[in-house]
Image (cartoon, rainbow, N blue to C red):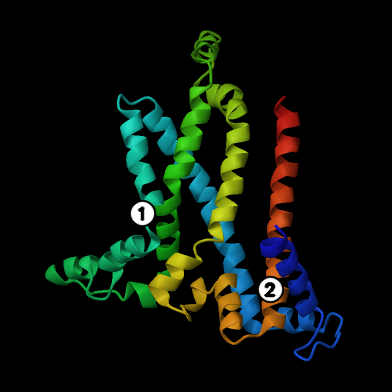
């Protein structure tokens, strides 16, 4: 903890408030970073990615878990959906490159049918492709979490709700939703954390300087590291850590509020 956490964290704070000569400059580095256009672009893209991918991840995972939960070979299906999680990032990116490259499978399919090909990886489709890659890689884990949460709901509750005349929505609202509330917030938290790990796939797909729509905070940090700009790198790391802490605190606060509302 001392070597890999406390000392690096202390050095980060030192670099954040000093210049390259070690002179104390107060908040000059923070002003420099937050006024940087590349940082603003990366921050905006990262927040937009979280805002889109987290709800999609939660909704799709829950719907798939609800469907698979009642199937005969549900464990087999769960394993199939978990496979992308254990496949190395390089193999995952190679698979999507085969599909979306200029001479990839999709463009070959379009060309053979006389349709116009699309440069998927170098157009406005970049953000959508990254969303698909993230969902492909992370849905399986959340699906298993939801399946575990659904398996703990007593079947008798659904039978009682049916006898009381409750429809599908009422059963979901008063039984399913209440029992998977804690699981849902866990999935939200894991989705937020995993959304910051999409950098590997984006870097392998697009390189050091990707399309503007998929230029994330990790790209900005990586570029500052390459140029040994420890001041900007440290400020960005502190801002990212603070942002994750705020998001996590918001999730826990929302969980308490919603739990108290339905308890």
Mark 1 and mark 2: Cα distance apart in space: 30 Å
Residue labelled with disc 1: 87
Q: Quadrant of residue 18?
A: bottom right
Looking at the image, the residue that sits furthest to the left is 112
Measured as percent of width and height from the top left, residue 26 is found at: 87, 81
Give x and y (percent) for residue 214: 50, 71
Answer few, some or many: residues within 10 Å of disc 2's Cα (few below 14, many 20 plus, some between 14 and 19): many
Quadrant of the rendering where the C terminus is positioned: top right
Residue closest to the far bottom: 21
What is the secondary structure assignment of the residue under circle 2? Answer: helix
Q: Nearer the viewer, residue 79 or 98?
A: 79
Residue at which label 2 appears = 236
SS at circle 1: loop
Q: Residue 41 falls in which quadrant of the image? A: bottom right
- Give me the residue at 85% from left, 85% from top: 25
Which one is in front, 64 or 86? Answer: 86
Q: Residue at x 37, y 58 (%)?
A: 88
Drawn side of residue 76 relative to residue 234, left or right: left
Tell me the residue at 70%/38% (across/down).
Answer: 255
Report the number of numbered marks.
Answer: 2
Taking 14 as reference, is 201 left or right? left
Q: Residue at x 78, y 72 (%)?
A: 13
Quadrant for the N terminus, please.
bottom right
Q: Are marks 1 and 2 in contact (CB under 8 Å)?
A: no
- Mark 1, residues whose alpha carbon is within 10 Å: few (<14), some, or many (≥20)? few
Vertical relation: 230 (above or below) 139: below
Residue 223 place in picture, x, y as percent: 56, 81
Q: Is residue 222 above or below residue 3?
A: below
Q: Earlier in the sequence, mark 1 or mark 2?
A: 1
Which numbered marker is on residue 213?
none
| Image quadrant where residue 64 sits | top left
Instruction: Tell me residue 126's x, y (percent).
Output: 42, 70
């Amino acid at each position: 903890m001392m070597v890999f956490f406390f000392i690096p964290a202390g050095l980060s704070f030192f670099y954040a408030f000093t210049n390259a000569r070690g002179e104390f400059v107060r908040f000059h580095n923070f002003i420099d970073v937050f006024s940087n256009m590349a940082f603003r672009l990366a921050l905006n893209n990262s927040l937009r990615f979280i805002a889109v991918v987290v709800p999609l991840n939660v909704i799709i995972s829950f719907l798939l878990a609800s469907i698979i939960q009642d199937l005969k070979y549900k464990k087999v299906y769960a394993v199939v959906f978990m496979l992308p999680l254990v496949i190395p990032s390089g193999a995952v990116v190679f698979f999507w490159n085969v599909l979306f490259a200029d001479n990839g499978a999709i463009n070959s399919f379009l060309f053979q049918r006389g349709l116009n090909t699309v440069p998927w990886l170098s157009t406005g489709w970049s953000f959508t492709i990254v969303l698909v890659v993230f969902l492909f890689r992370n849905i399986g884990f959340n699906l298993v979490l939801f399946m575990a949460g659904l398996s703990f709901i007593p079947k008798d509750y659904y039978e009682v709700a049916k006898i009381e005349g409750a429809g599908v929505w009422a059963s979901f609202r008063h039984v399913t939703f209440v029992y998977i509330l804690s699981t849902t917030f866990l999935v939200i938290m894991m989705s937020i954390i995993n959304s910051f790990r999409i950098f590997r796939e984006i870097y392998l797909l697009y390189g050091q300087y990707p399309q503007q729509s998929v230029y994330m905070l990790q790209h900005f940090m990586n570029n500052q590291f390459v140029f040994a700009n420890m001041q900007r790198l440290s400020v960005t790391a502190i801002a990212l850590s603070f942002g994750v802490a705020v998001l996590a605190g918001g999730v826990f606060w929302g969980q308490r509020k919603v739990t108290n509302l339905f308890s």
